[in-house]
Image (cartoon, helix red, strand yellow):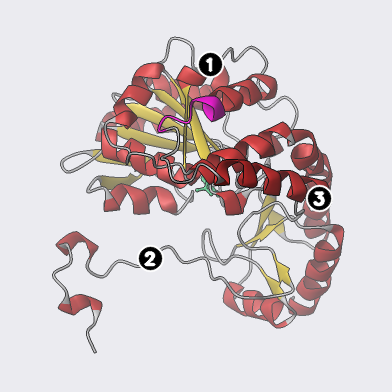
Amino acid sequence: MTSLSDLPIRDDLRGREPYGAPQIQVPYALNTNENPYPPSPALVAALGKAVEEVAGGLNRYPDRDATVLRAELADFLNLDTPGAGLTGRQVWAANGSNEILQQILQAFGGPGRTALGFEPSYSMHPIITRVSGTAWVDAARDDDFGLDPARAVAAIEEHRPDVVFLTSPNNPTGTALDPAAVEAVLDAAPGMVVVDEAYAEFRRAGTPSALTLLPGRPRLIVTRTMSKAFAMAGTRVGYLAADPAVIDALLLVRLPYHLSAITQAVARTALAHRAELLGTVDALRAERDALVTWLRDLGLTVAASDANFVLFGHLPDRHRVWQTLLDHGVLVREVGPPGWLRVTIGTPTEMTAFRAALQAAL
Ligand SMILES: *Cc1c(COP(=O)(O)O)cnc(C)c1O
């Protein structure tokens, strides 16, 4: 049997582990931060119709620049963040925000260059960074998972990274960044600053988006996704807002026709039905806040969350707790610092199952 090490694979990929959130069939999947509510029958019908409409033209390549979708995403961001004033020229879309991040690293990272992040944070940032041949520096978050502006600036001055990743609300901790920290990083960074806002729609009222910082800052990139609040993880659409010059840079590295006609049609239909899709966000937020209180009443430590998941600890043997939950049909994510577990907010039924299973595990 041939094994990976027998192949002439790149030296820097030897011994690496692939991204690995387990995909196990369980009654209660609370491990990958999806929105638990599937599309309604009416939306399923609309999605089917949209696919049917493009199906007759599938002999042709799609709009390479996804012009209409980008304009509609800009409209959505202007509703999300009043005053953002974005046009389609400032928005770019790809197959999940992971592909967006990959294109950013291909354009602004690469051999001899460095990207810096503050961990614990999204595990794909270092993976995509290294795969693009870019060196990764972990500058570590504060003990409360926040980011002290002065410490962040000191790390940037020490390492002079070509790309900085900020995640707000952060995954796996749920922490939203202090806007002062984002601004301090922008002022200090010599290269591009990516604010990954995959969970922005779940943020608590009064928490600003980095979109408000875009005017006059051509090295800022704000990334978003339809995979989380928008309940479209299966569609694979992520997007960014930035200066048009940033998009010109990404055009140099993207694959031609990267976003299929079907993906564009489905994403546009989802945007047109945003009232339904985002209509679950308030309920998920309320469920999240109730879970935080319940976990704290159990005596656990819980990170403040502006997202649709909660990180809790400190568990002397977190793997045993994870396994006991799984034995009860509840899959959560074993991620974050030792002693912590992350649970995605699901439906009330799913949360009842989680609570019962956790009580059995503790
Ligand atoms: C889930 C997640 C993403 C989303 O990735 P997609 O490729 O858009 O599905 C990006 N960033 C963070 C921090 C995430 O947790």
The residue positioned 42% from the left and 15% from the top of the image is: 217
Looking at the rendered structure, the secondary structure element under dot 1 is: loop
Which mark is nearer the camera, 3 or 2?
3
Q: Quadrant of residue 108?
A: top left
Picture disc at residue 18: 2
Whether ligand 1 has any atom under 8 Å from the Cβ at mark 1 is answered as no
Residue named by callout 1: 87
Crowding at dot 3, Cα within 10 Å, few <14 / some 14-19 / many 20+, comes out as few
Whether ligand 1 has any atom under 8 Å from the Cβ at mark 3 is answered as no
- At which x and y percent is residue 152? 41, 32
Answer whether residue 105 is visible to the viewer in this image. Answer: yes
Q: Amino acid at mark 1?
A: Thr
On the picture, is 176 further left or further right than 142? Answer: right
Q: Say which quadrant the C terminus sits in.
A: bottom right
Whether ligand 1 has any atom under 8 Å from the Cβ at mark 2 is answered as no
Looking at the rendered structure, the secondary structure element under dot 3 is: loop
